[in-house]
Amino acid sequence: MMGSNILEERMLQDTLGVFRDDSQSSVTPAQGVMLIDGWLQALQGDPNLEQLEAELTELRNELQSGQPNEQRVRELMLSLADKTQAIAEGPNAEGTWTGGLESLSKILRNFSNKL
C-alpha cells in the first residue's frame, strides 16, 4: 500500500517540492531522472505497483536518451498522473497522503501539457 513507509512519504514531499519550487517549467531531465530513481527505490518490492514501476523506468530511459521523444514523455506523464489519481482515490488512501497524491497528479498533468 502506498504511503505505508517513510521513503514513499519523503519522495512525495521531495517531488512536490521540486515541481513547486521550480515553477514546473524549469525541471530538467536530470532532475526528473533523480526523482524517478528515488521513486523506484521507494516502490521497490511492492507487487501491486509493477506497472507503475515499468512506466517510471520507461520515462527515466526516455529522459536519459540524447533526444527524448516529447510525445512519449507526455503520454507517460499523463498515464502516471491517472494512476496517481486512482491511488489517491483508492480504498487505502488516507489523510495528508491523499492530498499530496492529488496534488502530484495535477502537477504531472500540468507539466505534461507544457511539453
Image: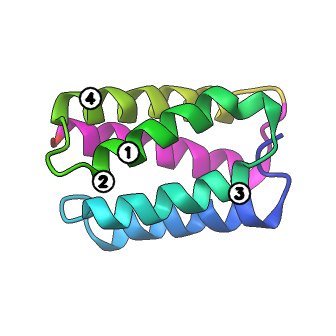
Up/down of 32 relative to 21, above or below: above
User: Looking at the image, is mark 1 or mark 4 nearer the viewer?
Assistant: 1
Find disc 3 in the rendering and name its residue. 42
Task: Identify the mark nearer the N-term, 4 or 2.
Answer: 2
Element type where label 2 sits in the image:
helix
- Mark closest to the chain's N terminus, 1 or 3: 3
How far apart marks 1 and 3 lie (CA) works out to 18 Å
- Please name the predominant secondary structure of the magenta segment in the image: helix
What residue is drawn where x is 83% and y is 59%? Answer: 5
Quadrant of residue 14 within the rendered picture:
bottom right
The quadrant the C terminus occupies is: top left
Residue at coordinates 26% horizontally, 29% vertically from top-left? 72
Instruction: Tell me the amino acid under the disc marked 4.
Output: Arg
Query: Secondary structure under badge 1?
Result: helix
Label 4 close to label 2 by CB (< 8 Å)? no
Asked whether the beta carbons under mark 2 and mark 3 sit within 8 Å of each other, the answer is no
Which residue lies under the disc numbered 2? 64
Magenta residues, start to end: 92-113
Gap between marks 1 and 4 measured at Cα: 11 Å
Verify whether residue 101 appears in magenta.
Answer: yes
Q: Which residue is mark 1?
A: 61
Give the residue type at disc 3.
Ala
